[in-house]
Image (spheres, coloured by chain):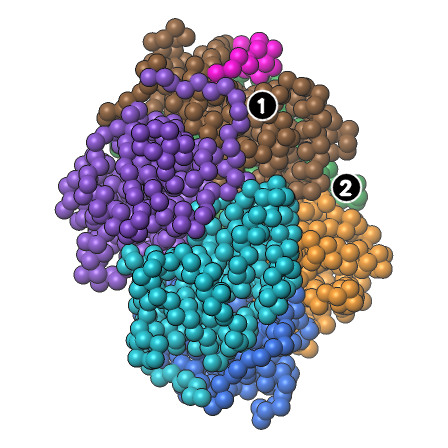
Chain colours: A brown, B purple, C cyan, D blue, E orange, F green
């Protein structure tokens, strides 16, 4: 199968190392292509960025289904952001499964523990994630929503990120009574093992869920099993005039 | 004060009669300008349309605050759609109050009755509105979400719309135990009086809330009283590269 | 229009200055008359006081609608207390809109931020307000309920009140994750501007909602737009023997 | 122990037969005195009636604790109405347990089944009971709230009441998925056995909870075990001026 | 009436003193027999122990109803553990009321205060109790779930237990805003009076609910009043092959 | 990897055809062994059956982790029943992932649609599943819980089952507003394709989730990714005396 890893920003942040890490649990027969946006924000840190990323995300999903572009046809799309930009719009438009980073990570985490804490990057994104939790009706399982105070484009400071994630995870466990941690930004690449090890060392034998890996695996499941979003929920957009930008 | 009535579609649906009806409860000193989008859908009937309308909505709100365009500067913006397209994004971007159609209608309806029913146009928009209810945490007050099966662009058939709204309202009252009705599309113009009268005739002494009127009045309140969205909730978008379309 | 500002206590606390502050956002054509009770408590700080205030509140609302008393006829009544004493009873009795302080402040605050904190006077009133939140189904939006430890009749110490409101607001923001503050007592007159300024100075660019102003404006909206409580929710009291006190 | 059965209406509805039925499960050593109000409604069928009954209910509870009146001193008070008029106010005022009809019936019913349906007298009282459910946080257990369309003062037509209760119970079971029935008016005396038998005959082996019996038994438990309302929740009314009617 | 106090563990922990304390509020005509398990855990501190205790609990309840064993026939069974092991299974099997320790304590506590805190023995049991709260739909009333860090079999250190219960209760009141305390382990025998007195001394005039006493009294109520679990909820197990262990 | 498909009943219901259907989406390198219980019920249709199956389920999971039995060592266990018998107990006992049928099916279904309906076999099992939904905090996503009135051991009548599932699914969609269907019994083998096709033919383009397939795939994911239940949630059973049956 062919899956599209759509990084919904204009910045050149994706590296082969990130791909190797993120796609490591997929089947050998699964091919992944990574694309980024031409129009949109350089990172997604709030509702404004989400809005700006959404149209091209939806458009790329339509291309991914049609396959008339250079990248060819895809069986499923992962919109590589915990903010799920354009995901619900895209689901209306196509008949292939589309996931953002929020849902698969949460659905997998639900199998891990009763009380979950989501730890993200900045205060700015918390209302957006809070809205996702409410829309998903998962408020009874999420005991806290925390952030490490590091912008997305500064996540390359690996040590800092790991240390701050451990700090916030300990707070989540001891103060909020969390049983497991969900990394609430798909920019948290290659850190879950170290965070989980750091927590174990601190005496907390818990689980850390990484969102992009979870999403890729869930997407592969859906394609393998022939599942996709229900058309009774995500009804096809009705035919009518729509003006897209033509740059 | 100057308020912007931003109709977030590309179609030429707004008429002076609609303005007269919608703005009738505003103070004499309030000036309203109506604008529509250049890029976007011709009507909003689902997540896909919402996504396509959002960027220009946010952009117009920024212009409305800056006032460097022909339309001048505004003290508040009403995004004239029950789907609230781009509203949360715009709130992050500006320091003037921004409302879509959902929230003010609901907030006013909360003062009218315990059990509310929202009646909208088509099945396609229900998941979007359902998501708005969940995000707003108002699920305990909304006893049902109904639709009349008429697309937005067909709402001009006044008699049909009134009749179907009465039918669905009666269902909402007798089956869902609703105490009051919220018209769940800002395209339901100039019908609330007839629907309410029709219901009274049928034996139901209830209240019908029209969304655009409610939004304009609430917006005027906010400007008058010096209120706007909290910046702790809607934090200003951080400075960074963003590629907008340049058509 | 004529609105009744019914202060539901027997004490002589209302001053022209309070009126000037509270009614400042109303239209020029709106006349407000302020009355207080003959029987009831001298302040409302719990369920017991609420119970004692309620009968005369309901009775005055009936008089306000009939207009056969000296004060004349009114188009709407504001029961000037965050505890909403007698409000639901009065709504059953009359066909003019009746608001207490809780609902309009909350409905307006819902348009300001996702996470609200209510700050009131004393521990004694918190269960009453907690009950109002539960009955209103707004628990998902209220992240905390705090108090400043000052009885209603001591609220005249302006500086103390402002300082303690700022202190509790900072706690609400930093500990409870509140985005905006609702002043949970209509005795908090002429303080919202200073509290909001104090919070801004402390680094919190947030919004403070004052309940009596909000109620007067919402009441004016309702009368202007022809809205009132639904009779399907607030059914007229059935005819039967009722013994009122005749003192 | 001595318990006060306070019938919170002015009408002369209580009979020795009702007492024999209602108090049949109490211990031999428990003495019950029944009193009614001098001021208040002749029956309680909504918020207006509840408001009118509340002050004297609270006052009688204070007398019951002090014991300086003719009726002597009591160890606990049952306010004999499913609408719980004045109950929370009275609890603040006294240090003896006070129950209305709603809570004990519900607390006992929670031990009987997961899904409960409350069946009351008239549409007018449903919002009041709905508010009690919300305030009590029991919404997840109450699957429906129904009524038989018979005013309180017409409940003497025993056969009609039984038949209509069976009809509504069958609806609650088959349509609302109720597992057990709570009789939502303390005027439903001497009917639970017949309703339960009628349901069994119709094929539904379920349980019918009668509110006044439940309340008397729970009140006796509380007195026996030395329990009463927490003073952290129901704080004593602060000393200050209060004008009561002096008729 | 005859009630079975079934201690669902294999250890020999029950003493006549515990019986005198636990059964002190029952009527003179009520006979209580205490039995323990032959197979099961020596204490219940988690889901694993609960699973191991459940089968014999259900079996003993069946025997208690049939009365063909040495212990004779019983009118009701109290499964003496706050974890309610086997309670729902037993309720399906028999037509006599069966209670564990969780429900009656909670139902009685609901009559005491709005905000409850449950304090149990060890971290290990909290997820089990958390699940009971969720299944019971009582999450809105329970503001916290705490533990004293003492295993069940060490509860004999009376002074330690009382002191730690007071400490945690003070935390529950001051940090979690609890109004009353539920002792979340039926091994907390003979401590509620001292804990309540200690809290009063510390300035907190609150109520402490002891679970086993509450359960015995509620069970006696149910038998007296002829109530039991609804058969629409707890349907009799269907006839089919079942292999029990035959040791 | 080696996965244990543990059928938690004593009856000989599992066939190679069921295995071929259920395991079809697993990787080639995944080996599955199917075992059934020696002690327990012949099918699981309520709390009583669940209780009887649980101990051996937990014991087999311990064996599966230790690998000292004939079946060897396993990397994860699927307890093949939608009632999740013994699952939480087993999770405490072992450090390999353990899933029943409820959670994985629900977690996968959450990615498919907002509104889910679960359709199971008999009325008897609905309270058990209702409890699972409540404990999982997923009540906001499950719009109905239905059953087809066919006992587990009669599920071999393939045509009947498919037809009744389609009937109930149509009811779920049209009456309960479901967007997708979860098959609420792992005995519903080899029917999802026909039910989904039947619904499409009836005009409903929806998705049907089969529980055992979902569980096997999710279990494989967990093992592949190194995830398992959090030990902060599922703490290891403390060392102490436990009497197991020794037959």
Q: Compared with residue D71, is residue E183 higher up or lower down, i.e. above or below?
A: above
Which quadrant, please, contains the N terminus of chain C? bottom left
Q: Which residue is mark 1?
A: A152
Closer to the camera: disc 1 or disc 2? 1
Task: Please give the name of the residue rendered at 36% of the width and 11% of the height, measured from the top-left corner.
Answer: A67
Task: Please give the name of the residue rendered at 47% of the width and 72% of the height, measured from the top-left corner.
Answer: C8
Task: Tell me if C223 is positioned left or right of F156 in this view.
Answer: left
Q: Compared with residue F53, is residue C53 higher up or lower down, i.e. above or below?
A: below
Task: Please give the name of the residue rendered at 19% of the width and 56% of the height, measured from the top-left corner.
Answer: B198
| Furthest residue toward top | A70
State the image coordinates of residue F192 (x, y, percent, origin top left): 39, 29
In front of the other: D220 or C1? C1
Q: Which residue is mark 2?
A: F238
Give the SS element for disc 2. loop
State the image coordinates of residue C152 (x, y, percent, origin top left): 58, 67
The subunit letter for the residue under badge 2 reads: F
**Magenta residue span:** A7-28
Task: Tell me if A116 is positioned left or right of A221 in this view.
Answer: right
Q: Quadrant of residue E197?
A: bottom right
Q: Quadrant of residue B82?
A: top left
Task: Please give the name of the residue rendered at 70% of the width and 23% of the height, measured from the top-left corner.
Answer: A160
Give the SS element for disc 1. helix
Tally of marks = 2
């Amino acid at each position: 199968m062919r899956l599209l890893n759509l990084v919904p920003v204009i910045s050149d942040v994706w590296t082969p190392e990130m791909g190797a890490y993120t796609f490591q649990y997929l089947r050998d027969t699964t091919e992944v292509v990574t694309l980024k946006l031409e129009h949109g924000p350089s990172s997604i840190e709030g509702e404004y960025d989400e809005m700006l990323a959404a149209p091209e995300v939806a458009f790329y999903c339509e291309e991914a289904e049609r396959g008339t572009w250079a990248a060819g046809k895809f069986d499923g799309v992962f919109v590589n952001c915990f903010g799920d930009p354009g995901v619900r719009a895209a689901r209306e438009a196509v008949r292939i499964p589309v996931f953002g980073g929020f849902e698969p990570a949460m659905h997998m985490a639900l199998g891990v523990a009763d009380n979950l804490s989501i730890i993200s990057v900045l205060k700015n994104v918390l209302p957006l994630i809070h809205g996702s939790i409410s829309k998903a009706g998962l408020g009874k399982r999420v005991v806290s929503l925390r952030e490490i105070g590091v912008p997305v484009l500064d996540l390359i400071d690996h040590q800092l990120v790991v240390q701050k994630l451990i700090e916030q995870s300990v707070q989540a466990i001891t103060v909020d009574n969390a049983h497991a941690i969900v990394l609430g930004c798909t920019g948290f690449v290659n850190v879950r093992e170290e965070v989980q090890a750091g927590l174990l060392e601190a005496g907390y034998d818990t689980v850390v869920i990484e969102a992009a890996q979870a999403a890729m695996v869930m997407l592969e499941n859906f394609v393998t099993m022939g599942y996709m979003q229900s058309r009774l929920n995500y009804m096809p957009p009705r035919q009518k005039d729509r003006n897209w930008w033509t740059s």
